[in-house]
Amino acid sequence: MDPAGGGVPPESPASAEDAIDRLVATLATTDISASQRRLYRSMLQTVASLAGESAEVIDLKVADSALAEMAEAFRVFRPLRRERKVTIFGSARTQPAHPAYRCARDLAASMADANWMVVTGAGDGIMAAGMEGAGRDKSIGVNIRLPFEQSPNAFIAQDPKLVQMRYFFTRKLMLIKESDGYVVLPGGFGTLDEGYELLTLLQTGKAEPAPVVMLDIPGGDYWQAWEEFLRSHVEPRGLVSPEDRSLFLITDDVAEATSEILGFYRNYHSCRWVGDLLVMRLTMTPDKAELAELNREFSDIVAGGSMRMSKPLPPERSDGDHLDHPRLVFRFDKTHYGRLRQLINTINRITPP
């Protein structure tokens, strides 16, 4: 005890760091990498910081619930990480007899036939249509608990691939983070919110490049009217660039929507940053003439030097990161992501020798 009667003195910063290191060592039941150890320490340091600041109960509840929801979602998605996935967004109010329901169901069925999994918000309407089309085995649900109780639809209820969430922000994170393509059907505030956040993440480079389809009913004008609003009121004010419209495709044809998503990965595979270099993993290697044309057409987004082909860089070799793919490497300006999408489209038109 403190001789002055003040109780047990707080740990010094050094002893708190030692305690965190001991806790990481205790909690890690298997061998972990240096990166994992660093991140576990960082999370525990955040908890220690909250405790040291005597955070209010409501703040602790939000942090605790959000972390628990993400941990549960990570657990559900982890065995499925190697599976290609498409997330379908749309209104819970859409009835089964509506053409949009049939579009979502048919789109999901065509993606499941291509061996993709379908992710939806697990509710009614378009979400149910997606899961009906994909079938239970190819469906993953991320449901939201609402005051009026949105129950999971019958196509995913009681399935181990269903995640229940309290917060919209954690739900949107999982609907976007885990997928390789996205389809947005006509919807209300929630659907528009999801679509705008998705496009914002792609426009700012906070999400990896991915195909986005705004799918309408045959002959519908929902997304055409939305795009006209962008053209007439948003672009003229300089709030978005015309090239940003390359981030999405508007169509009323399920076959074209399917082709857009699958075609995005025809040659382009994935990308990552290594220092200030953007590394794009491909399936086919451009020949010298094609590489020269890429450098000519997209010189405006290269921040120095030129695009070049490369073998896996040392950090990629260390991580064992898709080592069998050829690489297109360059210093991307980190600004013009619409143009980057145009580059991917051009790369996907490269044909085998």
Image (cartoon, grey):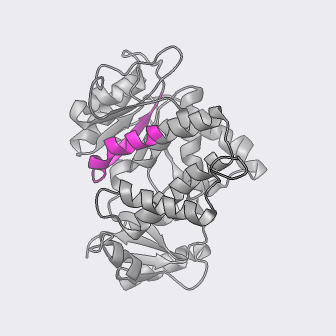
**Foreground: 121 or 341?**
121
Horizontal side of 6 relative to 145 (left or right) equals right
- In the rendered image, residue 326, in percent from the top left (x then y), is placed at 33, 76
Question: Where does the C terminus fall, quadrant-wise?
Answer: bottom left
Identify which residue is drawn at 48% across, 25% down.
91
**Residue 217 picture quarter:** top left
Give the residue furthest to the front: 3
Determine if residue 7 is in view. Answer: yes
> Which segment is the magenta one?
68-90
In reply to whether residue 75 is colored magenta, the answer given is: yes
In front of the other: 34 or 253? 34
Q: Residue at x 61, y 40 (%)?
A: 227
Q: Is residue 33 above or below residue 142?
A: below
Position of residue 150 measured from the top left corner of the image (x, y, whole percent) = 45, 18
* 269 displayed left or right of 273: left
Asked whether residue 246 is in view, the answer is no
Q: Which image quadrant for residue 204?
A: bottom right
Q: Is residue 127 magenta?
A: no
Give x and y (percent) for residue 232.
Answer: 71, 42
Q: Is residue 64 above or below residue 189?
A: below
Q: How many marks?
A: 0
Is residue 5 found left or right of 101 in the rendered image? right
Nearer-the-camera pick, 167 or 140 = 167
Vertical arrangement, residue 124 with respect to residue 332, above or below: above
Q: Position of residue 289 (x, y in %)?
A: 40, 83
